Image (cartoon, helix red, strand yellow):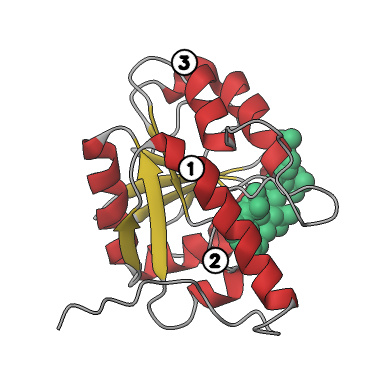
Amino acid sequence: MSSITLIGTGNMARAIGTLAVAGGNTVEVMGRDQSKAADLAKALGGGATTGKWGAVPAGDIVITALLADGVVPVVTEYGDALAGKVIVDISNPFNATFDGLAHSEETSIAQEVAKVAPAGASVVKGFNTIFRNVLEKGRPSVFIAGDNAQAKTDVAAFIESLGLRPLDAGGLKMAHWLEGMGLVTVSLANNGVGHWDFALGVDEFTG
Ligand SMILES: NC(=O)c1ccc[n+]([C@@H]2O[C@H](COP(=O)([O-])OP(=O)(O)OC[C@H]3O[C@@H](n4cnc5c(N)ncnc54)[C@H](OP(=O)(O)O)[C@@H]3O)[C@@H](O)[C@H]2O)c1
């Protein structure tokens, strides 16, 4: 089992935290609003605790469940408190019209996080292609990307503990394209699929 810290107290923190507790993981919650963090930890149950904003997280895996434009500033603010941690960026930096990413160049929030993360920290992109409501249903694929093989192994084990299917999409540069997948998923919901109760996955035709 894994020890995780959720930085953020919103919808995704609640959804991932709920599955994490059910999967027997140790969960800590941190929020810039301490009372929201305490409320979420209490709601999650399972011995979930609250950490002080900016302090060294108790979890080995730190999930930044924050709006996209808050992720790099918050990782910068935490600074050395994140040394040695596996930082999981779940964000979708969509533009205002949901037909492109907020950054124009070929980067991603995860790659920008890696630039400001302290020594020994590893960054993994993941969960951004899964709608919150789908996390509670079935066994959707959770695409991950990162440059550190051990960090991806650790995050994959955590994802397995949630009852979800981890799928390694490659190095951290692929985080840009996972953000694009997030965009495609939203566009499919708004167009061809017509609802939000689905997830992108992989069909294998090996036989
Ligand atoms: N919802 C989904 O279905 C879904 C699916 C895949 C990926 N995502 C991604 O997951 C992330 C979280 O989404 P969500 O649905 O959980 O959003 P949410 O419910 O709005 O929660 C956002 C959280 O981020 C915190 N926050 C925002 N800006 C911050 C900043 N500058 N500094 C510190 N804290 C900040 C908020 O704190 P306060 O409460 O104090 O404002 C809140 O705890 C987003 O990046 C989103 O793109 C969401």
Q: In the figure, 117 relative to 38: above or below? A: above
Question: What is the three-letter code of the residue carrying label 1?
Answer: Ala
Q: Residues within 10 Å of mark 2 (few under 14, many from 20)?
A: some
> What residue is pinned by disc 3?
80
Image quadrant where residue 60 sits: top left
Label 2 with label 1: CB-CB less than 8 Å: no
> What residue is pinned by disc 2?
15
Q: In the figure, 3 relative to 1: above or below? A: above
Circle 1 sits in a helix, a strand or a loop, which is it? helix
Mark closest to the chain's N terminus, 2 or 1: 2
Label 1 or label 3, whichever lies nearer to me, is 1
The residue drawn where x is 59% and y is 82% is 197
Label 2 with label 3: CB-CB less than 8 Å: no
Report, in whole angstroms, how far the alpha carbon at label 1 lies from the one at label 3.
23 Å
Question: What is the three-letter code of the residue carrying label 3?
Answer: Asp
**Residue 175: assigned label:** 1
**Viewer-nearest residue: 191 or 14:** 191
Q: Position of residue 20 (x, y in %)?
A: 40, 62
Report, in whole angstroms, how far the alpha carbon at label 2 lies from the one at label 1.
22 Å
Circle 2 sits in a helix, a strand or a loop, which is it? helix
Q: Residues within 10 Å of mark 3 (few under 14, many from 20)?
A: some
**Viewer-nearest residue: 169 or 77:** 169
Left/right of residue 180 with respect to residue 163 in the rendered view: right
Q: In the figure, 71 relative to 186: above or below? A: above
